[in-house]
Amino acid sequence: MALIVQKFGGSSVADAARVMNVASIVTDTYRAGNDVVVVVSAQGDTTDDLIAKAEEINPKASRREMDMLLASGEQISIALLAMAIEKLGCPVCSLLGWQAGFSTNSTHGSARIKKVSAERIKMEIAKKNIVVVAGFQGLNKYDDITTLGRGGSDTSAVAIAAAMQADRCQIFTDVEGVYTADPRKVPNAKKLEDISYDEMLELATLGAQVLNNRSVEMAKKYNVQLEVLSSLVRKPGTIVKEVSSMEKMLVRGVTKDTNVARITIIGVQNDPGIAYKIFGKLAAKNINVDIILQSVGRDNTKDIVFTTTKAHAEECVEVLQGLDLLAGLKITCETDVAKVSVVGAGMESHPGVAAKMFEALFEADINIQMIATSEIKISVLIDAKDADKAVSAIHNAFIPVLN
Ligand code: ADP
Ligand code: ASP
Ligand code: MG
């Protein structure tokens, strides 16, 4: 007998038929003799719809009230799924995040899990109940409801699996696993049998939405073996684990991130300490920056270009405009950009991956604005309108290597 955590995303519980389908997967697992904890997201587009409702009333609503609203989506799902499980004749108990013991910090909208006490879950399991937990939510030290950020139910599932030392954590979704590119955009993308935590973390951080990056970070930290699989087709999915078995595979995935803005500062003084003062100020405001480029100093000045998220772009420009050392300089913000990346542990020991990627972009007539590399990834910043074409071109350039 094993303890299995199963998470179902919004599309997997989108309507009554899908909820019944999930109930049958869960009850089959339970009837096979396992203890089962289920984590669910809000149905279909519920979270987006709730955000739209809030915007109709107050586009500047406080993050606390947004959390109060958004957490309600998952409350609907757990109750409906529990009713479906009851209908199939199995004992079940649904729990909100706070009932399941999720304590978080107070960063409303992107709260971090501090602890999952899981006592209530354990009690319900001891009573032989299937436990259905609302993903994406917790409680802060003031007893206020918090949410973990978009896609946060994946992290809720991994956190329960880690806290309860579950034997398996299965993330059910609307595709059959992790692919070499988004299978909805790149039809010849290949399903991966397995992938390492580090590669999956890069892919998730660089835009592959199939797993939330924080969930992968947590799975790696607590050694939770994840499986990503379809809720619609009963087939093995992709295993995320310490070391992938396909070491020779050069590139594991190609992904795009359109949540990027590029900030340019022209004519900064060519003196020591300038970068420190600029980026120190942004860090103090909690503004994340990603790729940074600085031109070679000329005529006592240099240019600095960097990327941040679209959400931070406006604030970023305001902060820079308020800095005395940048007074009178031209600061521009470009949001029609996208970051396209290739990820693969194999590229560390293989020269030529960057050249091949750049050749594919050249052949597709796509201009590269910025380049960033690390041991297992290469990212380029390009025009947003070229992003899908770039992903396909790069993917197709590496596909023969994958076969
Ligand atoms: P859920 O609602 O189950 O959490 P998401 O919409 O968050 O599902 O994530 C699943 C989606 O991720 C897929 O429908 C697919 O379009 C997208 N996706 C992006 N990149 C990849 C990839 N490399 N492999 C698989 N799916 C991907
Ligand atoms: N319902 C939340 C969202 O849409 C959490 C999740 O789906 O993981 O982001
Ligand atoms: Mg998701």
Image (tube, rainbow, N blue to C red):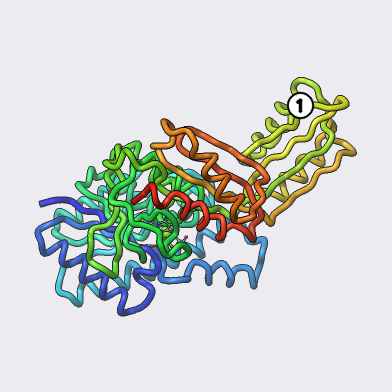
**Left or right: residue 257 compared with residue 227:** right
Q: Label 1's element?
A: helix
Which amino acid type is shown beneath numbered disc 1?
Ile
Viewer-nearest residue: 147 or 124: 147
Viewer-nearest residue: 365 or 67: 365
Specify the quadrant of the image occupied by residue 219. Answer: top left
Specify the quadrant of the image occupied by residue 56. Answer: bottom right
Q: x%, y% of residue 97? A: 37, 56
Residue under pointer 1? 274
Which residue is pictured at 33% across the width and 48% down the height?
158
**Left or right: residue 258 compared with residue 46:** right
Viewer-nearest residue: 180 or 63: 180
| The image quadrant in which ligand 1 is located | bottom left
Tell me how many marks there are: 1
Q: x%, y% of residue 324? A: 85, 33
Specify the quadrant of the image occupied by residue 86. Answer: bottom left
